[in-house]
Image (tube, helix red, strand yellow):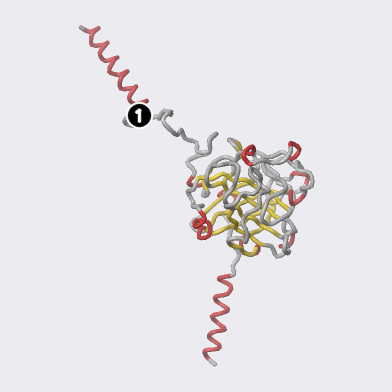
């Protein structure tokens, strides 16, 4: 009898601890994703048929896509025109981000997607994509089944986006989290260089709706035309976004600002020696 009571007590202690919903970073901890050298943006109602919670929105002051990280999780955020999960019930659509890991911008290798297609409880799923069937297209379906799937209630949330009201009403953030323990075996570590696309969808394992940084009126979205900016999975490990994504000169053609042996330092020493010699000759 005592053992039975002890078992009940242990269950009451352990279950809530393992079923606790994800705690997301504060707003100040998120870093904007980029398209080329600019912040990831998207116009209001730019994609026919993808409105309301399927409409990604954003401008330079209120980015369409952001990311954050800590030692345990990668956090992803999308700005949407309406609530994708009112009252916690996920709408019957999908929202996701695709990651390039090989530098070839006509395909993606990983996708993280939030979906309510199979039911209002919703899921957060991690997909691998090693077989490309639709090159250069965000609608290219990921490999099935999903590598990992998590409950929406544990690994995602929708909240009001402060100070953002496209369409005359408050916008919403869709936040979702995936642990590094699931991402690292697939090739995405905290410091891994990557390119990220963000889009909405009517299906779970592909993105066929509104694509960030793409004007739907201009025709089908193409991954390499959207050209997302290069970053690292954990934004804290990105040396600095610039036109090439890294914010630093790479290869042999750049000039350093200083330091022993750098071109600038060497030139300064040569000029100093020449000035010294000229002054010495004048004095003689």
Q: Does residue 276 appear left or right of residue 49 in this picture?
A: left
Q: Please identify the quarter of the rendering in which residue 166 is found.
A: top right
Is residue 48 found left or right of 24 in the rendered image? Answer: right
Label 1: element kind: loop
Of 201 and 275, which appears nearest the observer?
Answer: 201
Query: Closer to the camera, 111 or 283?
Result: 111
- Image coordinates of residue 232 in percent, x first then y, are 51, 46
Can you say whether 185 is above or below 19 in the image?
above
Look at 49% across and 52% down and name the residue there. 189
Query: In the visual, does 102 lie left or right of 227?
Result: left
Residue 261 percent across, percent down from the top left: 32, 30
Residue 238, position as x, y percentages in the image: 49, 43
**Residue position marked by numbered label 1 in the rendering:** 262
- Can you tell which quarter of the image residue 45 is in? top right
Badge 1 density bin: few <14, some 14–19, many ≥20, Cα 10 Å: few
- Counting labels gives 1
Residue at point 68%, 50% (across, down) = 207
Q: Nearer the viewer, residue 146 or 210?
A: 146
The residue at the point 76 percent across, 48 percent down is: 50
Q: Quadrant of the N terminus?
A: bottom right
On the image, the x and y values in percent for residue 191 come to 47, 48
């Amino acid at each position: 009898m005592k053992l039975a009571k002890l078992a009940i007590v242990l269950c009451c202690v352990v279950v809530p601890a393992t079923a606790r919903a994800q705690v997301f970073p504060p707003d100040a901890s998120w870093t904007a994703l980029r398209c080329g050298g600019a912040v990831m943006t998207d116009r209001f109602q730019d994609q026919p048929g993808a409105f309301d919670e399927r409409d990604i929105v954003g401008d330079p002051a209120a980015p369409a896509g952001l990311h954050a990280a800590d030692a345990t999780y990668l956090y992803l955020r999308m700005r949407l025109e309406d609530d994708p999960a009112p009252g916690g019930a996920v709408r019957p659509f999908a929202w996701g981000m695709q990651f390039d890991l090989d530098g070839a911008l006509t395909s993606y290798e990983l996708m993280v997607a939030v979906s309510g297609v199979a039911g209002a409880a919703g899921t957060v799923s991690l997909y691998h994509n090693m077989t490309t069937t639709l090159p250069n297209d965000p609608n290219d379906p990921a490999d099935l089944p999903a590598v990992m799937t998590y409950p929406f209630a544990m690994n995602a949330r929708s909240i009001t986006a402060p100070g953002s009201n496209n369409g005359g009403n408050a916008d919403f953030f869709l936040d979702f989290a995936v642990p590094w323990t699931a991402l690292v075996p697939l090739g995405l570590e905290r410091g891994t260089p990557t390119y990220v696309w963000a889009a909405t969808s009517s299906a779970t394992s592909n993105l066929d709706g509104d694509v960030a940084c793409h004007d739907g009126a201009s025709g089908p979205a193409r991954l390499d035309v959207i050209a997302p900016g290069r970053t690292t999975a954990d934004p804290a490990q990105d040396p600095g976004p610039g036109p090439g994504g890294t914010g630093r000169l790479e290869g042999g053609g750049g000039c350093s600002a200083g330091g022993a042996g750098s071109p600038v330092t060497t030139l300064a020493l040569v000029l100093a020696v020449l000035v010294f010699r000229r002054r010495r000759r004048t004095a003689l």
